[in-house]
Amino acid sequence: MEKDNDYLRDQILKMNEDTSLKTLQEYSNEMEDIRGFKNDIYQTMLYLTEEMGELAKEVRKSEKLYLDEAKSKDVDVDGELADVFMYVLSLARIYNINLLDAFKNKELKNCERVWK
């Protein structure tokens, strides 16, 4: 099977609530290869920052904060959050980080901290 957007669509449709972070990271890596998105760290950070701004705008719209009356009122927090997540996966690829291990290690450290 040729690896193209149809292949990616098939991979997405196989995913469910039991899909692991490792599987998502592998999907992200394949998607970047297929679509030619292999950006360096600087490009990836810029794209992540851009997507964070778009996510902030969608949250602002969903909370009915200051809105530009001339712009769309449609809210797409989930879509922008997914974009941010894709760039987080991309950064994990660039730095060869297993996100599940990173998450667990960080939370174990956080469990030792005093939160007030």
Image (spheres, grey):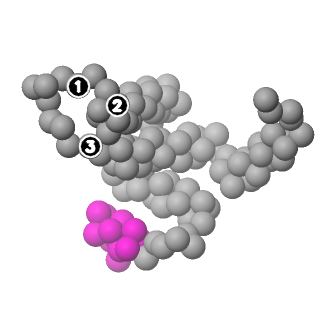
Residue 10 rendering spot, x and y as whole percentages? 35, 74
Q: Which type of secondary structure does the marked residue at label 3 adopt?
A: loop
Q: Are marks 1 and 2 in contact (CB under 8 Å)?
A: yes
104 versus 41 height, above or below: below
Q: Earlier in the sequence, mark 2 or mark 3?
A: 2
The residue singled out by tag 3 in the image is 75
Magenta stretch in the rendered image? 1-13
Q: Which type of secondary structure does the marked residue at label 1 adopt?
A: loop
Quadrant (top left/top right/bottom left/bottom right) for the N terminus: bottom left
Q: Of residues 7 and 116, which is closer to you in this image?
A: 116
The residue singled out by tag 2 in the image is 60
Q: Earlier in the sequence, mark 1 or mark 2?
A: 2
Q: Which mark is residue 67?
A: 1
Residue 99 rendering spot, x and y as whole percentages? 66, 50
Q: Residue furthest right?
A: 112
State the CA–CA distance, disc 2 to disc 3: 9 Å
Report if residue 9 lies within the magenta region. yes
